[in-house]
Image (cartoon, rainbow, N blue to C red):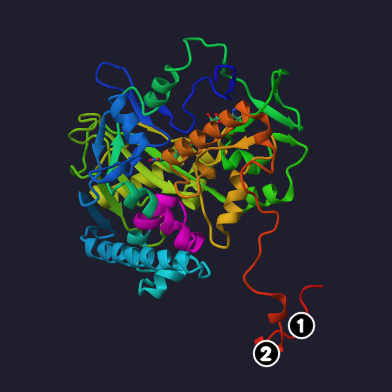
């Protein structure tokens, strides 16, 4: 297919693969750091399928460090403190949850929150057990951006198995000075010429009108593009904010699906110091005595094999703490971080010479970092997020049933919808709703109405 247009908000391609310049090298030039995705997650190989993003990383010679979760140092209010045993206990509890979630899925047992599933396997830490809270944050919130209360037991286990068992438990941390999005630019160059008129950069879509015959895309600069088919890859955040007007308005099954899933905020805070004062460990973990998830993780980039001599370290916060940091000034965030780092490394460590962090929750082309699957939904509810409406198709990480949130999820969904459209174009009849992707007008609950009776302690009619 050669007759297509790519309409892109920004002045670059890559989306949430987004390298930025940060800090300075000794020659005055900047370093490149990743504001968006940083890891190739679940590499595969050796008897397992290879993750297609790993294949692309190899093809384009991406520089990356193999992640070693054991290569960590743990701290609390007393300084360096080894609580890795607690972290091992949490990992063991999660393994049990994943096994049980597998049977729940097969046997169609009602889903529950990840919190409930953890309690049932004996993991039930007190809120003031800062070591256990940190262990939990590192094993759950760090991956999904959400707490165990906000995660589905079944589908967080599916996501874990799909990426880290189907492929493998190995991850690569990308530090390539051309940026991780080199893989996107490299692939685009295989079908786009330099300055290709089919790539419209700096073009903001404001409305999409779809009919049985065609789809019209309107942009902020007043252009109207008419197409036989459209693939929307807007993030879930963009769809949820209603910043693009779809006409006719979405049917209720699509509206409900968009409302039912979540997009989290994962914020990396980059600091450059005159020189490194941290140990050569990949993960430096802070168990805050007062607040779960308060600047819980620092990852040195000034590390042998990454950006040695750079003086750069990267902190991570998610959701509630990310929203707070994103709403405050760089200086306010720096002051908070320095208080933590001074407890970890001594009160004499100097202030950084540079700080930068993106505001993912406020970014108008993303409104969040990556999607997550909450409790109280189902495969059908999620399928409704994927399904086409006539000539309007959907793709992107959020539509992936098993790899939602990840780059490889976006890759597989884009490929699947592309292949589907290619068939539609060859045989136009194949693109009606009836022959398109499955969708579910009604999502049924688990309890029939006649069970709401006296026998079950139900005495007041609350349905009025
Ligand atoms: C901080 C962060 C860390 C992450 N870490 C990892 C990781 O380590 N590993 C991993 O696998 N995944 C990670 N992810 C997730 C990964 O980046 C995404 O899953 C993936 O990049 C999503 O691709 P996509 O094509 O679905 O969406 P996007 O990359 O968001 O593409 C959508 C495109 O639509 C454009 N757009 C939006 N609105 C408009 C409009 N109105 N008009 C025109 N164009 C518009 C956007 O500019 C964008 O280019 C991370 C994401 C973030 C933000």
SS assignment for the magenta stretch, majority: helix
Q: What residue would you read off at disc 2?
A: 455
Picture coordinates of residue 168, whole percent (x, y): 29, 48
The region drawn magenta spans 137-160
> For residue 460, which numbered disc appears in the image?
1
Picture coordinates of residue 238, whole percent (x, y): 61, 38
Q: Relative to 61, say whether 113 is above or below.
A: below
Residue 323 visible from this viewpoint:
yes
Which part of the image, by quadrant, shows the C terminus? Answer: bottom right
| In the image, residue 240 lies in the stretch drawn in magenta | no
Q: Relative to 21, say whether 99 is above or below.
A: below
For residue 459, what is the image quadrant?
A: bottom right
Q: Relative to 403, say whether 270 is above or below.
A: above
Q: Which residue is drawn at the image coordinates 46% and 38% (left, top)? A: 412
For residue 418, what is the image quadrant?
A: top right
Give the left or right position of residue 209, taking residue 381 as reference.
Answer: right
Q: Which residue is drawn at the image coordinates 67% and 89% (left, top)? A: 455
| In the image, residue 155 lies in the stretch drawn in magenta | yes
Q: 10 Å neighbourhood of mark 1: few (<14), some, or many (≥20)?
A: few
């Amino acid at each position: 297919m050669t007759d297509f247009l790519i309409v892109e908000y920004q002045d670059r391609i890559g989306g949430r693969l987004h390298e930025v310049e940060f800090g300075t090298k000794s020659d005055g030039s900047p370093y490149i750091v990743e504001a968006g995705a940083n890891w190739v997650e679940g590499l595969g190989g050796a008897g397992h399928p290879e993750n297609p993003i790993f294949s692309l990383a190899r093809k384009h010679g991406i520089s990356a460090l193999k992640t070693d979760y054991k290569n960590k140092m743990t701290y609390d209010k007393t300084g360096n403190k080894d609580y890795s045993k607690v972290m091992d206990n949490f990992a063991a509890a999660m393994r049990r949850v994943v096994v049980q979630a597998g049977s729940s899925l097969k046997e169609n047992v009602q889903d529950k929150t990840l919190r409930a599933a953890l309690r049932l396997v004996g993991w039930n830490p007190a809120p003031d057990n800062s070591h256990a809270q940190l262990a939990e944050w590192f094993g759950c919130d760090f991956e999904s951006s959400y707490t165990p209360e906000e995660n589905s037991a079944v589908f967080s286990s599916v996501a874990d198995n799909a990426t880290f068992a189907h492929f493998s438990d190995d991850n690569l941390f990308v530090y390539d000075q051309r940026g991780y999005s080199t893989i996107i630019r490299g692939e685009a160059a295989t079908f786009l010429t330099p300055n290709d008129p089919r790539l419209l950069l700096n073009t903001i879509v404001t409305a999409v009108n779809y009919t049985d015959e065609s789809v019209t895309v309107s942009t902020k600069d007043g252009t109207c593009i008419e197409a036989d088919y459209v693939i929307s890859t807007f993030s879930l955040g963009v769809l949820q904010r209603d910043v693009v007007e779809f006409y006719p308005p979405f049917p209720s099954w699509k509206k409900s699906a968009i409302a039912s899933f979540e997009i989290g905020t994962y914020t990396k805070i980059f600091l450059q110091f005159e020189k490194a004062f941290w140990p050569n460990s990949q993960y430096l973990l802070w168990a805050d005595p007062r607040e779960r998830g308060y600047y819980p993780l620092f990852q040195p980039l000034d590390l042998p094999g990454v950006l040695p001599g750079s003086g750069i370290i990267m902190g991570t916060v998610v959701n509630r703490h990310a929203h707070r940091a994103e709403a405050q000034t760089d200086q306010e965030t720096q002051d908070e971080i320095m208080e933590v780092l001074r407890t970890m490394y001594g009160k004499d460590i100097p202030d950084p010479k540079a700080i930068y962090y993106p505001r993912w929750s406020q970014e108008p082309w993303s409104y969040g970092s990556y999607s997550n699957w909450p409790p109280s939904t189902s495969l059908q509810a999620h399928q409704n997020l994927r399904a086409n409406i006539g000539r309007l198709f959907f793709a992107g990480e959020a539509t992936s049933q098993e790899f939602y949130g990840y780059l490889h999820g976006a890759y597989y969904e884009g490929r699947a919808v592309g292949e589907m459209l290619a068939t539609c174009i060859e045989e136009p009849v194949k693109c009606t709703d009836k022959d398109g992707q499955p969708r579910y007008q009604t999502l049924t609950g688990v309890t029939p109405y006649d069970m709401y009776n006296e026998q079950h302690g139900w005495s007041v009619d609350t349905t009025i």
